[in-house]
């Protein structure tokens, strides 16, 4: 699990190596983002697909869509904060280990 800081740090190490390594990293990153986007968490596309299917089956579920969406955003924000905190701890640990 890695956030923006970890992605930039990993990409930064590959920039100077070779074009092939950088392209492999880019493809890996894009595939991971595509798979993550299909998770059944409501603000993401996978959650919207699941909610659309459930609404076809049972129409009163429309009332739950907004609370579930807000809960999904809170979950995603928490996951982002957690991943960023882990990345910052890794960077701090790496800096402390080199001095």
Image: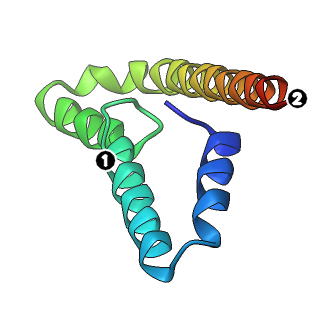
Q: Quadrant of the C terminus?
A: top right
Q: Is residue 75 left or right of residue 55?
A: right
Name the one closer to the observer, 39 or 5.
5
Q: Residue furthest left?
A: 57
Left or right of 4? Residue 48 is: left
Q: Which residue is mark 2?
A: 99
- Residue visible at 61% across and 27% down in the picture: 83
Mark 1 vs mark 2, foreground winner is 2
Q: Which residue is mark 1?
A: 35
Q: Secondary structure at mark 2?
A: loop
Mark 2: few/some/many CA within 10 Å (<14, 14-19, 20+): few
Front position in the image: 32 or 22: 22
**Residue 59 position within the rendered picture, expressed as x and y whole percent measured from the top left:** 23, 27
Which percent across, then down, holds residue 34? Answer: 35, 54
- Could you tell me which residue is drawn at 67 percent across and 53 percent down? 8
Disc 1 from disc 2: Cα separation: 38 Å
């Amino acid at each position: 699990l890695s956030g923006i800081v970890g992605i930039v740090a990993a990409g930064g190490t590959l920039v100077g190596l070779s074009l092939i390594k950088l392209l492999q990293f880019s493809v890996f990153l894009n595939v991971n983002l595509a798979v993550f986007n299909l998770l059944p968490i409501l603000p993401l596309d996978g959650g919207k697909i699941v909610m659309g299917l459930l609404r076809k089956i049972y129409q009163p579920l429309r009332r739950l869509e907004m609370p579930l969406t807000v809960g999904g955003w809170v979950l995603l924000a928490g996951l982002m904060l957690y991943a960023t905190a882990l990345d910052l701890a890794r960077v701090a640990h790496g800096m402390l280990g080199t001095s």
